Amino acid sequence: MKIEDQITSAALAAVKDLYGAEVPEKMIQLQKTRADFEGNLTLVAFPLLKTSRKKPEETAQEIGEYLKRNCKAVADFNVVKGFLNLVIAPAAWVGLLNDINADEKFGEKTAGEGSPLVMIEYSSPNTNKPLHLGHVRNNLLGWSLAQIMAANGNKVVKTNIVNDRGIHICKSMLAWQKWGNGITPEQAGKKGDHLIGDFYVAFDKHYKEECKTLQAQYESEGMPADDAKAKAEQEAPLIREAHEMLVKWEQGDPEVRGLWEKMNNWVYAGFDETYKALGVGFDKIYYESNTYLAGKKKVEEGLEKGLFIRKDDNSVWADLTDEGLDQKLLLRKDGTSVYMTQDIGTAQMRFADFPIDKMIYVVGNEQNYHFQVLSILLDRLGFKWGKDLVHFSYGMVELPNGKMKSREGTVVDADDLVASMIENAKSLSEDKVNKLEGITDEEKNEIARIVGMGALKYFILKVDARKNMLFNPEESIDFNGNTGPFIQYTYARIRSILRKAEAQAVGIPAVLPDDAPLNEKEIASFRS
Protein backbone atom coordinates (compact mmCIF):
# COMPACT_ATOMS: atom_id res chain seq x y z
CA MET A 1 0.00 0.00 0.00
CA LYS A 2 1.27 3.49 -0.82
CA ILE A 3 2.47 5.62 2.08
CA GLU A 4 -0.26 8.20 1.37
CA ASP A 5 -2.91 5.46 1.40
CA GLN A 6 -1.61 4.10 4.72
CA ILE A 7 -1.78 7.53 6.31
CA THR A 8 -5.19 8.32 4.85
CA SER A 9 -6.64 5.06 6.16
CA ALA A 10 -5.13 5.63 9.60
CA ALA A 11 -6.34 9.26 9.68
CA LEU A 12 -9.92 8.17 8.90
CA ALA A 13 -9.68 5.69 11.77
CA ALA A 14 -8.29 8.44 14.03
CA VAL A 15 -11.26 10.74 13.35
CA LYS A 16 -13.70 7.91 14.07
CA ASP A 17 -11.95 6.80 17.29
CA LEU A 18 -11.21 10.31 18.58
CA TYR A 19 -14.39 12.11 17.62
CA GLY A 20 -16.92 9.32 17.03
CA ALA A 21 -17.68 10.22 13.43
CA GLU A 22 -16.96 8.84 9.98
CA VAL A 23 -15.88 11.38 7.37
CA PRO A 24 -15.45 10.97 3.59
CA GLU A 25 -11.94 10.25 2.34
CA LYS A 26 -11.77 13.63 0.54
CA MET A 27 -11.67 15.30 3.99
CA ILE A 28 -8.17 13.87 4.53
CA GLN A 29 -6.01 16.33 2.63
CA LEU A 30 -2.31 15.43 2.32
CA GLN A 31 0.35 17.57 0.68
CA LYS A 32 4.14 17.74 0.59
CA THR A 33 5.61 19.40 3.67
CA ARG A 34 7.13 22.80 3.04
CA ALA A 35 10.92 22.69 2.79
CA ASP A 36 11.33 25.02 5.79
CA PHE A 37 9.49 22.62 8.14
CA GLU A 38 10.49 19.19 9.42
CA GLY A 39 8.48 16.41 7.83
CA ASN A 40 7.64 14.73 4.56
CA LEU A 41 3.85 14.88 4.29
CA THR A 42 1.45 17.38 5.82
CA LEU A 43 -2.15 16.66 6.84
CA VAL A 44 -4.38 19.74 6.74
CA ALA A 45 -6.58 19.77 9.86
CA PHE A 46 -8.98 22.58 8.95
CA PRO A 47 -11.54 20.41 7.03
CA LEU A 48 -11.90 18.27 10.20
CA LEU A 49 -12.68 21.08 12.69
CA LYS A 50 -16.46 20.77 12.40
CA THR A 51 -16.11 17.12 13.35
CA SER A 52 -13.56 17.57 16.15
CA ARG A 53 -15.17 20.79 17.48
CA LYS A 54 -11.73 21.79 18.68
CA LYS A 55 -9.09 24.34 17.73
CA PRO A 56 -6.85 23.60 14.68
CA GLU A 57 -3.70 23.07 16.78
CA GLU A 58 -5.46 20.76 19.23
CA THR A 59 -7.07 18.71 16.46
CA ALA A 60 -3.76 18.33 14.63
CA GLN A 61 -1.96 17.37 17.86
CA GLU A 62 -4.49 14.65 18.75
CA ILE A 63 -4.49 13.14 15.26
CA GLY A 64 -0.67 13.27 15.18
CA GLU A 65 -0.40 11.37 18.46
CA TYR A 66 -2.90 8.79 17.17
CA LEU A 67 -0.98 8.29 13.92
CA LYS A 68 2.35 7.93 15.73
CA ARG A 69 0.83 5.17 17.90
CA ASN A 70 -1.17 3.35 15.26
CA CYS A 71 0.40 3.94 11.82
CA LYS A 72 3.74 2.28 11.11
CA ALA A 73 4.43 4.77 8.31
CA VAL A 74 4.61 7.68 10.78
CA ALA A 75 7.76 8.03 12.90
CA ASP A 76 7.14 11.49 14.36
CA PHE A 77 5.16 14.69 13.86
CA ASN A 78 5.03 18.40 14.61
CA VAL A 79 2.16 20.88 14.47
CA VAL A 80 2.25 24.33 12.90
CA LYS A 81 -1.13 25.94 13.49
CA GLY A 82 -3.61 23.70 11.64
CA PHE A 83 -0.98 21.79 9.72
CA LEU A 84 0.17 18.38 10.92
CA ASN A 85 3.67 17.72 9.55
CA LEU A 86 4.42 13.99 9.48
CA VAL A 87 7.89 12.44 9.49
CA ILE A 88 7.79 9.19 7.52
CA ALA A 89 9.42 6.14 9.13
CA PRO A 90 12.55 4.79 7.37
CA ALA A 91 10.90 1.35 7.12
CA ALA A 92 8.08 2.93 5.08
CA TRP A 93 10.58 4.39 2.62
CA VAL A 94 12.29 1.01 2.33
CA GLY A 95 8.91 -0.60 1.72
CA LEU A 96 8.22 1.90 -1.04
CA LEU A 97 11.58 1.14 -2.67
CA ASN A 98 10.82 -2.59 -2.54
CA ASP A 99 7.41 -1.98 -4.16
CA ILE A 100 9.05 0.06 -6.92
CA ASN A 101 11.71 -2.59 -7.49
CA ALA A 102 9.12 -5.39 -7.66
CA ASP A 103 6.96 -3.62 -10.25
CA GLU A 104 8.56 -3.24 -13.70
CA LYS A 105 5.74 -0.87 -14.69
CA PHE A 106 5.72 1.15 -11.47
CA GLY A 107 3.92 4.44 -11.90
CA GLU A 108 2.24 3.40 -15.14
CA LYS A 109 -1.43 2.66 -15.64
CA THR A 110 -2.68 0.26 -18.28
CA ALA A 111 -5.52 1.38 -20.52
CA GLY A 112 -8.62 -0.78 -20.22
CA GLU A 113 -11.92 -1.09 -22.04
CA GLY A 114 -13.41 1.98 -20.39
CA SER A 115 -10.31 4.14 -20.56
CA PRO A 116 -10.65 7.57 -22.21
CA LEU A 117 -9.44 7.96 -25.78
CA VAL A 118 -7.09 10.89 -26.33
CA MET A 119 -6.15 12.03 -29.81
CA ILE A 120 -2.94 14.07 -30.06
CA GLU A 121 -2.15 16.03 -33.20
CA TYR A 122 1.44 17.00 -33.88
CA SER A 123 3.91 17.66 -36.70
CA SER A 124 1.48 19.30 -39.19
CA PRO A 125 4.02 19.86 -41.98
CA ASN A 126 3.52 21.73 -45.23
CA THR A 127 4.35 19.87 -48.43
CA ASN A 128 6.26 22.83 -49.84
CA LYS A 129 9.35 22.47 -47.66
CA PRO A 130 11.33 19.99 -45.55
CA LEU A 131 10.96 19.69 -41.79
CA HIS A 132 13.04 22.15 -39.79
CA LEU A 133 14.13 22.73 -36.20
CA GLY A 134 10.69 24.03 -35.19
CA HIS A 135 9.15 20.77 -36.44
CA VAL A 136 11.72 18.84 -34.40
CA ARG A 137 10.47 20.47 -31.18
CA ASN A 138 6.86 19.91 -32.24
CA ASN A 139 7.37 16.22 -33.04
CA LEU A 140 9.34 15.47 -29.89
CA LEU A 141 6.79 17.25 -27.69
CA GLY A 142 3.87 15.49 -29.40
CA TRP A 143 5.46 12.05 -29.23
CA SER A 144 6.45 12.53 -25.57
CA LEU A 145 2.99 13.80 -24.63
CA ALA A 146 1.51 10.69 -26.25
CA GLN A 147 3.76 8.44 -24.13
CA ILE A 148 2.84 10.34 -20.96
CA MET A 149 -0.89 10.13 -21.67
CA ALA A 150 -0.60 6.39 -22.40
CA ALA A 151 1.36 5.82 -19.18
CA ASN A 152 -1.51 7.48 -17.31
CA GLY A 153 -3.99 4.88 -18.52
CA ASN A 154 -5.38 6.59 -21.60
CA LYS A 155 -5.91 5.10 -25.02
CA VAL A 156 -3.96 7.32 -27.40
CA VAL A 157 -4.25 7.99 -31.12
CA LYS A 158 -1.26 9.87 -32.54
CA THR A 159 -2.35 11.87 -35.55
CA ASN A 160 -0.88 14.21 -38.13
CA ILE A 161 -2.59 16.73 -40.40
CA VAL A 162 -0.57 17.34 -43.55
CA ASN A 163 -0.98 20.78 -45.08
CA ASP A 164 -0.91 19.54 -48.65
CA ARG A 165 -2.93 22.26 -50.37
CA GLY A 166 -3.13 26.04 -50.46
CA ILE A 167 -1.34 29.01 -51.95
CA HIS A 168 2.03 28.04 -50.42
CA ILE A 169 1.88 24.65 -52.14
CA CYS A 170 1.02 26.33 -55.44
CA LYS A 171 4.06 28.57 -55.09
CA SER A 172 6.41 25.57 -55.11
CA MET A 173 4.47 23.93 -57.95
CA LEU A 174 4.57 27.06 -60.09
CA ALA A 175 8.29 27.56 -59.45
CA TRP A 176 9.01 23.93 -60.46
CA GLN A 177 7.01 24.45 -63.67
CA LYS A 178 8.90 27.62 -64.53
CA TRP A 179 12.46 26.79 -63.51
CA GLY A 180 12.58 23.07 -62.73
CA ASN A 181 13.15 21.74 -66.26
CA GLY A 182 11.40 18.53 -65.21
CA ILE A 183 13.99 17.67 -62.55
CA THR A 184 13.22 14.83 -60.08
CA PRO A 185 14.69 14.05 -56.64
CA GLU A 186 16.69 11.19 -58.16
CA GLN A 187 18.17 13.44 -60.83
CA ALA A 188 18.96 16.15 -58.29
CA GLY A 189 20.40 13.67 -55.78
CA LYS A 190 18.19 15.16 -53.08
CA LYS A 191 15.36 14.07 -50.83
CA GLY A 192 12.04 15.11 -52.34
CA ASP A 193 11.12 17.50 -49.53
CA HIS A 194 14.44 19.32 -49.95
CA LEU A 195 14.01 19.64 -53.69
CA ILE A 196 10.52 21.11 -53.38
CA GLY A 197 11.70 23.42 -50.60
CA ASP A 198 14.31 24.82 -52.98
CA PHE A 199 11.58 25.82 -55.41
CA TYR A 200 9.58 27.46 -52.62
CA VAL A 201 12.60 29.64 -51.87
CA ALA A 202 13.06 30.29 -55.61
CA PHE A 203 9.47 31.50 -55.89
CA ASP A 204 9.97 33.99 -53.06
CA LYS A 205 13.18 35.29 -54.64
CA HIS A 206 11.55 35.96 -58.04
CA TYR A 207 8.37 37.29 -56.43
CA LYS A 208 10.32 39.87 -54.43
CA GLU A 209 12.08 41.01 -57.59
CA GLU A 210 8.74 41.50 -59.33
CA CYS A 211 7.34 43.38 -56.33
CA LYS A 212 10.36 45.66 -56.23
CA THR A 213 10.01 46.49 -59.94
CA LEU A 214 6.25 47.14 -59.69
CA GLN A 215 6.58 49.22 -56.54
CA ALA A 216 9.11 51.48 -58.26
CA GLN A 217 6.73 51.83 -61.21
CA TYR A 218 3.75 52.75 -58.99
CA GLU A 219 5.82 55.22 -57.00
CA SER A 220 6.98 56.87 -60.23
CA GLU A 221 3.30 57.36 -61.05
CA GLY A 222 2.84 59.31 -57.82
CA MET A 223 1.54 56.58 -55.52
CA PRO A 224 2.66 56.73 -51.84
CA ALA A 225 5.34 54.17 -50.95
CA ASP A 226 3.18 52.05 -48.58
CA ASP A 227 0.30 51.91 -51.05
CA ALA A 228 2.68 51.11 -53.90
CA LYS A 229 4.21 48.26 -51.92
CA ALA A 230 0.83 46.77 -51.01
CA LYS A 231 -0.45 46.99 -54.59
CA ALA A 232 2.76 45.47 -55.98
CA GLU A 233 2.44 42.49 -53.63
CA GLN A 234 -1.11 41.89 -54.87
CA GLU A 235 -0.53 42.55 -58.56
CA ALA A 236 2.83 40.82 -59.13
CA PRO A 237 2.37 38.29 -61.98
CA LEU A 238 3.79 35.39 -59.98
CA ILE A 239 1.36 35.71 -57.08
CA ARG A 240 -1.56 36.12 -59.49
CA GLU A 241 -0.50 32.95 -61.30
CA ALA A 242 -0.22 31.10 -57.97
CA HIS A 243 -3.77 32.14 -57.04
CA GLU A 244 -5.03 31.07 -60.43
CA MET A 245 -3.37 27.69 -59.92
CA LEU A 246 -5.06 27.35 -56.52
CA VAL A 247 -8.47 28.01 -58.07
CA LYS A 248 -7.76 25.43 -60.79
CA TRP A 249 -6.72 22.94 -58.12
CA GLU A 250 -9.98 23.41 -56.22
CA GLN A 251 -11.88 23.01 -59.51
CA GLY A 252 -10.11 19.67 -60.05
CA ASP A 253 -8.04 20.66 -63.10
CA PRO A 254 -6.37 17.38 -64.24
CA GLU A 255 -3.00 18.93 -65.12
CA VAL A 256 -2.69 20.88 -61.87
CA ARG A 257 -3.88 17.91 -59.81
CA GLY A 258 -1.42 15.58 -61.53
CA LEU A 259 1.53 17.86 -60.80
CA TRP A 260 0.36 18.34 -57.22
CA GLU A 261 0.14 14.58 -56.60
CA LYS A 262 3.56 13.91 -58.11
CA MET A 263 5.35 16.58 -56.11
CA ASN A 264 3.56 15.70 -52.86
CA ASN A 265 4.61 12.06 -53.17
CA TRP A 266 8.23 13.22 -53.44
CA VAL A 267 7.78 15.18 -50.23
CA TYR A 268 6.05 12.35 -48.32
CA ALA A 269 8.96 10.01 -49.03
CA GLY A 270 11.32 12.64 -47.61
CA PHE A 271 9.16 13.21 -44.51
CA ASP A 272 9.10 9.49 -43.75
CA GLU A 273 12.90 9.38 -43.62
CA THR A 274 13.00 12.29 -41.20
CA TYR A 275 10.30 10.86 -38.93
CA LYS A 276 12.18 7.55 -38.79
CA ALA A 277 15.41 9.34 -37.82
CA LEU A 278 13.58 11.23 -35.04
CA GLY A 279 11.94 8.03 -33.79
CA VAL A 280 8.37 9.31 -34.09
CA GLY A 281 5.31 8.06 -35.94
CA PHE A 282 1.54 8.30 -36.25
CA ASP A 283 -1.51 6.07 -36.00
CA LYS A 284 -3.60 8.12 -38.44
CA ILE A 285 -2.70 10.79 -40.99
CA TYR A 286 -5.22 13.29 -42.35
CA TYR A 287 -4.71 15.48 -45.41
CA GLU A 288 -6.13 18.95 -45.82
CA SER A 289 -6.89 18.13 -49.44
CA ASN A 290 -9.60 15.83 -48.04
CA THR A 291 -10.68 17.76 -44.97
CA TYR A 292 -11.15 21.20 -46.54
CA LEU A 293 -14.28 20.08 -48.40
CA ALA A 294 -15.88 18.92 -45.15
CA GLY A 295 -14.94 22.27 -43.64
CA LYS A 296 -16.45 24.26 -46.51
CA LYS A 297 -19.67 22.27 -46.19
CA LYS A 298 -19.95 23.05 -42.47
CA VAL A 299 -19.25 26.74 -43.12
CA GLU A 300 -21.97 26.83 -45.77
CA GLU A 301 -24.38 25.14 -43.36
CA GLY A 302 -23.49 27.73 -40.74
CA LEU A 303 -24.10 30.48 -43.29
CA GLU A 304 -27.60 29.13 -44.00
CA LYS A 305 -28.34 29.06 -40.27
CA GLY A 306 -27.25 32.67 -39.86
CA LEU A 307 -24.14 31.79 -37.86
CA PHE A 308 -21.83 33.50 -40.37
CA ILE A 309 -22.04 36.46 -42.74
CA ARG A 310 -21.30 36.86 -46.46
CA LYS A 311 -19.80 40.19 -47.46
CA ASP A 312 -20.30 42.09 -50.71
CA ASP A 313 -17.15 40.61 -52.25
CA ASN A 314 -18.61 37.09 -51.68
CA SER A 315 -16.22 36.20 -48.83
CA VAL A 316 -17.63 34.48 -45.73
CA TRP A 317 -16.78 35.60 -42.21
CA ALA A 318 -17.53 34.72 -38.57
CA ASP A 319 -18.42 37.73 -36.43
CA LEU A 320 -16.87 37.09 -33.01
CA THR A 321 -17.25 40.58 -31.58
CA ASP A 322 -19.72 39.28 -29.00
CA GLU A 323 -16.86 37.10 -27.72
CA GLY A 324 -14.55 40.10 -27.41
CA LEU A 325 -12.72 39.16 -30.62
CA ASP A 326 -12.87 40.41 -34.21
CA GLN A 327 -14.23 38.97 -37.46
CA LYS A 328 -12.59 35.81 -38.84
CA LEU A 329 -12.35 34.92 -42.52
CA LEU A 330 -13.68 31.44 -43.37
CA LEU A 331 -13.97 31.50 -47.18
CA ARG A 332 -12.17 33.88 -49.54
CA LYS A 333 -14.07 35.87 -52.15
CA ASP A 334 -13.11 33.32 -54.84
CA GLY A 335 -14.59 30.52 -52.70
CA THR A 336 -11.29 28.99 -51.61
CA SER A 337 -10.88 27.93 -47.98
CA VAL A 338 -8.45 29.03 -45.27
CA TYR A 339 -6.76 27.14 -42.42
CA MET A 340 -9.70 27.72 -40.08
CA THR A 341 -12.11 26.12 -42.55
CA GLN A 342 -9.82 23.14 -42.96
CA ASP A 343 -9.48 22.67 -39.19
CA ILE A 344 -13.26 22.62 -38.83
CA GLY A 345 -13.47 19.86 -41.45
CA THR A 346 -10.57 17.92 -39.94
CA ALA A 347 -12.15 18.01 -36.47
CA GLN A 348 -15.47 16.75 -37.82
CA MET A 349 -13.80 13.86 -39.67
CA ARG A 350 -11.72 12.86 -36.66
CA PHE A 351 -14.65 12.70 -34.29
CA ALA A 352 -16.57 10.68 -36.87
CA ASP A 353 -13.64 8.23 -37.13
CA PHE A 354 -12.88 7.83 -33.41
CA PRO A 355 -14.84 8.03 -30.12
CA ILE A 356 -12.52 10.78 -28.90
CA ASP A 357 -12.83 11.94 -25.28
CA LYS A 358 -10.11 14.58 -25.49
CA MET A 359 -8.52 16.30 -28.48
CA ILE A 360 -5.06 17.85 -28.00
CA TYR A 361 -3.40 20.06 -30.62
CA VAL A 362 0.38 20.41 -30.27
CA VAL A 363 0.92 23.71 -32.08
CA GLY A 364 3.21 26.70 -31.47
CA ASN A 365 2.09 29.71 -29.44
CA GLU A 366 1.89 31.83 -32.58
CA GLN A 367 -1.43 30.05 -33.15
CA ASN A 368 -2.97 30.75 -29.72
CA TYR A 369 -5.59 33.03 -31.24
CA HIS A 370 -6.37 30.53 -34.00
CA PHE A 371 -7.29 27.80 -31.52
CA GLN A 372 -9.23 30.19 -29.34
CA VAL A 373 -11.34 30.98 -32.40
CA LEU A 374 -11.56 27.34 -33.52
CA SER A 375 -12.97 26.33 -30.14
CA ILE A 376 -15.65 29.02 -30.37
CA LEU A 377 -16.58 28.15 -33.96
CA LEU A 378 -16.84 24.41 -33.29
CA ASP A 379 -19.07 25.12 -30.31
CA ARG A 380 -21.17 27.52 -32.37
CA LEU A 381 -21.56 24.90 -35.10
CA GLY A 382 -23.02 22.48 -32.56
CA PHE A 383 -20.05 20.23 -31.81
CA LYS A 384 -20.37 19.41 -28.10
CA TRP A 385 -16.62 18.89 -27.84
CA GLY A 386 -15.73 22.30 -29.29
CA LYS A 387 -15.24 24.04 -25.95
CA ASP A 388 -13.18 21.14 -24.60
CA LEU A 389 -10.38 21.00 -27.16
CA VAL A 390 -6.89 21.52 -25.73
CA HIS A 391 -4.21 23.60 -27.41
CA PHE A 392 -0.83 22.39 -26.11
CA SER A 393 0.90 25.67 -26.88
CA TYR A 394 4.68 25.77 -26.98
CA GLY A 395 7.30 28.45 -27.57
CA MET A 396 9.26 29.02 -30.73
CA VAL A 397 12.80 27.77 -31.31
CA GLU A 398 15.18 30.60 -32.12
CA LEU A 399 18.76 30.66 -33.35
CA PRO A 400 21.59 32.86 -32.09
CA ASN A 401 21.12 34.99 -35.20
CA GLY A 402 17.34 35.31 -34.88
CA LYS A 403 14.11 33.75 -36.08
CA MET A 404 13.94 31.11 -38.82
CA LYS A 405 12.27 32.04 -42.13
CA SER A 406 11.39 29.26 -44.58
CA ARG A 407 10.68 31.58 -47.51
CA GLU A 408 14.15 33.04 -47.27
CA GLY A 409 15.80 29.67 -46.66
CA THR A 410 17.13 30.78 -43.25
CA VAL A 411 16.14 27.66 -41.33
CA VAL A 412 17.88 24.84 -39.52
CA ASP A 413 16.99 21.79 -41.58
CA ALA A 414 15.88 18.79 -39.47
CA ASP A 415 17.87 16.29 -41.55
CA ASP A 416 21.03 18.40 -41.42
CA LEU A 417 20.56 18.85 -37.67
CA VAL A 418 20.19 15.12 -37.01
CA ALA A 419 23.23 14.34 -39.17
CA SER A 420 25.37 16.97 -37.45
CA MET A 421 24.39 15.78 -33.97
CA ILE A 422 25.34 12.20 -34.84
CA GLU A 423 28.61 13.34 -36.46
CA ASN A 424 29.49 15.41 -33.37
CA ALA A 425 28.81 12.42 -31.13
CA LYS A 426 30.96 10.24 -33.37
CA SER A 427 33.85 12.71 -33.22
CA LEU A 428 33.65 12.90 -29.44
CA SER A 429 33.51 9.12 -29.05
CA GLU A 430 36.53 8.66 -31.33
CA ASP A 431 38.55 10.69 -28.81
CA LYS A 432 37.91 7.90 -26.31
CA VAL A 433 39.76 5.23 -28.32
CA ASN A 434 40.16 2.82 -25.43
CA LYS A 435 36.39 2.81 -24.88
CA LEU A 436 35.67 1.66 -28.44
CA GLU A 437 38.22 -1.11 -28.80
CA GLY A 438 36.87 -4.44 -29.99
CA ILE A 439 33.62 -3.17 -31.57
CA THR A 440 32.73 -2.96 -35.25
CA ASP A 441 32.26 0.22 -37.29
CA GLU A 442 28.55 -0.57 -37.45
CA GLU A 443 28.38 -0.69 -33.65
CA LYS A 444 30.34 2.57 -33.41
CA ASN A 445 27.89 4.26 -35.78
CA GLU A 446 24.93 2.99 -33.75
CA ILE A 447 26.49 4.32 -30.53
CA ALA A 448 27.02 7.70 -32.21
CA ARG A 449 23.38 7.71 -33.35
CA ILE A 450 22.07 6.88 -29.87
CA VAL A 451 24.25 9.50 -28.18
CA GLY A 452 23.61 12.18 -30.79
CA MET A 453 19.83 11.71 -30.82
CA GLY A 454 19.76 11.45 -27.04
CA ALA A 455 21.54 14.79 -26.84
CA LEU A 456 19.14 16.41 -29.29
CA LYS A 457 15.97 15.05 -27.70
CA TYR A 458 16.95 15.88 -24.14
CA PHE A 459 18.11 19.38 -25.08
CA ILE A 460 14.74 20.08 -26.69
CA LEU A 461 12.54 18.43 -24.05
CA LYS A 462 14.23 19.75 -20.89
CA VAL A 463 13.07 23.31 -21.68
CA ASP A 464 9.63 24.35 -20.39
CA ALA A 465 7.41 23.84 -23.43
CA ARG A 466 5.70 27.19 -22.85
CA LYS A 467 8.94 29.11 -23.26
CA ASN A 468 10.79 30.16 -26.38
CA MET A 469 14.15 28.45 -26.54
CA LEU A 470 17.50 29.37 -28.04
CA PHE A 471 19.11 26.41 -29.77
CA ASN A 472 22.85 25.91 -29.58
CA PRO A 473 23.99 22.52 -30.99
CA GLU A 474 27.36 22.71 -29.22
CA GLU A 475 25.68 22.86 -25.80
CA SER A 476 23.35 19.94 -26.46
CA ILE A 477 26.17 17.49 -27.24
CA ASP A 478 28.10 18.31 -24.06
CA PHE A 479 28.79 15.23 -21.92
CA ASN A 480 28.74 17.19 -18.65
CA GLY A 481 25.91 18.78 -16.72
CA ASN A 482 22.20 18.55 -17.44
CA THR A 483 22.46 16.83 -20.84
CA GLY A 484 21.27 13.68 -22.55
CA PRO A 485 24.74 12.13 -22.93
CA PHE A 486 25.45 12.65 -19.22
CA ILE A 487 22.27 10.74 -18.32
CA GLN A 488 23.13 8.02 -20.83
CA TYR A 489 26.63 7.78 -19.37
CA THR A 490 25.21 7.48 -15.84
CA TYR A 491 22.90 4.68 -16.95
CA ALA A 492 25.80 2.88 -18.68
CA ARG A 493 27.94 3.13 -15.53
CA ILE A 494 25.15 1.68 -13.36
CA ARG A 495 24.72 -1.22 -15.77
CA SER A 496 28.48 -1.78 -15.71
CA ILE A 497 28.50 -1.94 -11.90
CA LEU A 498 25.66 -4.47 -11.91
CA ARG A 499 27.46 -6.63 -14.48
CA LYS A 500 30.67 -6.60 -12.45
CA ALA A 501 28.76 -7.43 -9.27
CA GLU A 502 27.14 -10.38 -10.99
CA ALA A 503 30.47 -11.57 -12.40
CA GLN A 504 32.05 -11.40 -8.94
CA ALA A 505 29.04 -13.12 -7.32
CA VAL A 506 28.31 -10.07 -5.18
CA GLY A 507 24.78 -10.52 -3.89
CA ILE A 508 22.32 -7.72 -4.70
CA PRO A 509 19.17 -8.32 -2.62
CA ALA A 510 15.87 -8.40 -4.50
CA VAL A 511 14.17 -7.07 -1.37
CA LEU A 512 15.70 -4.66 1.16
CA PRO A 513 15.14 -5.44 4.88
CA ASP A 514 12.92 -2.98 6.74
CA ASP A 515 15.87 -1.82 8.84
CA ALA A 516 18.05 -1.07 5.80
CA PRO A 517 19.87 2.20 6.56
CA LEU A 518 18.93 5.33 4.60
CA ASN A 519 21.00 8.49 4.86
CA GLU A 520 19.64 12.03 5.01
CA LYS A 521 20.23 12.68 1.31
CA GLU A 522 18.33 9.54 0.34
CA ILE A 523 15.40 10.47 2.55
CA ALA A 524 15.48 14.07 1.31
CA SER A 525 15.22 12.81 -2.27
CA PHE A 526 11.71 11.55 -1.53
CA ARG A 527 10.58 15.13 -0.95
CA SER A 528 11.15 15.87 -4.63
Image (cartoon, rainbow, N blue to C red):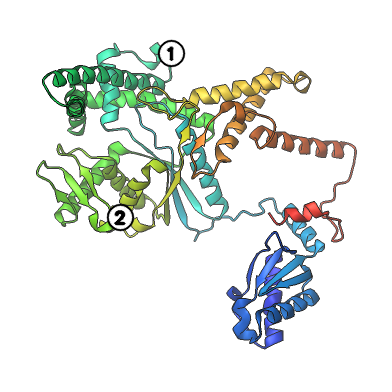
Q: Position of residue 278 (x, y in %)?
A: 53, 32
**Numbered mark located on residue 189 in the image:** 1
Mark 2 lies on a secondary structure that is: helix
Q: Is residue 478 left or right of residue 125?
A: right
Q: Is residue 348 shown above or below 129? A: below
Q: Quadrant of the N terminus?
A: bottom right
Please identify the quarter of the rendering in which residue 504 is found: top right
**Decide: marks 1, 2 in contact (CB < 8 A)?**
no
Q: Residue at x 64, y 54 (%)?
A: 107
Q: Position of residue 151 (x, y in %)?
A: 57, 51
Q: Residues within 10 Å of mark 1 (few under 14, many from 20)?
A: few
Q: Is residue 299 shown above or below 164? A: below
Q: Residues within 10 Å of mark 2 (few under 14, many from 20)?
A: some
Q: Position of residue 155 (x, y in %)?
A: 50, 52
Q: Position of residue 330 (x, y in %)?
A: 22, 45
Between disc 1 and disc 2, the foreground one is: 2
Q: Amino acid at mark 1?
A: Gly
Is residue 343 something that shows in the picture? Answer: yes
Please identify the quarter of the rendering in which residue 409 is found: top left
Q: Is residue 411 left or right of residue 247?
A: right
Please identify the quarter of the rendering in which residue 364 is found: top left
The residue that disc 2 covers is 376
Q: CA distance from mark 1 to mark 2?
A: 47 Å
Q: Earlier in the sequence, mark 1 or mark 2?
A: 1
Q: Residue at x 39, y 16 (%)?
A: 185
Q: Residue at x 73, y 78 (%)?
A: 61
Mark 1 lies on a secondary structure that is: loop
Q: Amino acid at mark 2?
A: Ile
**Numbered mark located on residue 165 in the image:** none
Q: Is residue 1 shown above or below 346? A: below
